[in-house]
Image: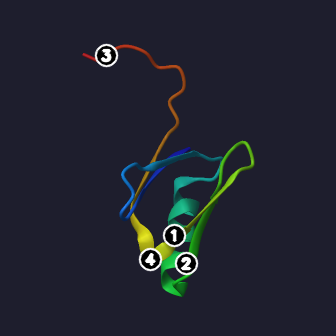
């Protein structure tokens, strides 16, 4: 699952490829925002991204597309 995270005052979004479902990502973010803590997500290689929940501008959850080339028409 590809997750794009926009962080306030950061020029680029973070892209994390993770094994968790989109629903679980939403749960993790909701819990972090409610507790005013950190949003933590681990990618498929075991690396962890930790962001203060108050600095998350947006989260886009979508499926991972590997090796797609060309245009759809």
From what the image shows, is residue 15 above or below residue 73?
below
Q: Nearer the viewer, mark 4 or mark 3?
A: 4
Front residue of this view, candidates 19 and 50: 50
Mark 4 Cα-neighbour bin, 10 Å: few <14, some 14–19, many ≥20: some
Q: x, y (%) of residue 73?
A: 24, 16
User: For the image shown, how many numbered marks are present on the structure?
Assistant: 4
Q: x, y (%) of residue 16?
A: 56, 47
Task: Point out the tag, 1 or 4, that comes first from the N-terminus.
Answer: 1
Residue lying at the far bottom of the rendered structure: 35
Q: Which residue matches tag 1?
A: 29
Q: Which residue matches tag 2?
A: 31
Q: Which residue matches tag 4?
A: 54
Tell me the CA gap for discs 3 and 1.
Answer: 33 Å
Mark 1 Cα-neighbour bin, 10 Å: few <14, some 14–19, many ≥20: many
Q: Which residue matches tag 3?
A: 71
Question: Disc 4 on helix, strand or loop?
Answer: helix
Question: Disc 3 on helix, strand or loop?
Answer: loop
User: Which quadrant: the N terminus?
Assistant: top right
Tell me the CA gap for discs 2 and 1.
Answer: 5 Å
């Amino acid at each position: 699952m590809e997750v794009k995270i926009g962080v306030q005052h950061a020029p680029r979004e973070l892209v994390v490829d993770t094994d968790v479902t989109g629903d679980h990502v939403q749960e993790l973010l909701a819990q972090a925002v409610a507790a005013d803590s950190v949003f933590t997500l681990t990618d498929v290689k075991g690396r962890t991204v930790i962001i203060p929940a108050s600095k998350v501008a947006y989260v886009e959850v979508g499926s991972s597309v590997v090796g797609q080339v060309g245009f759809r028409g």
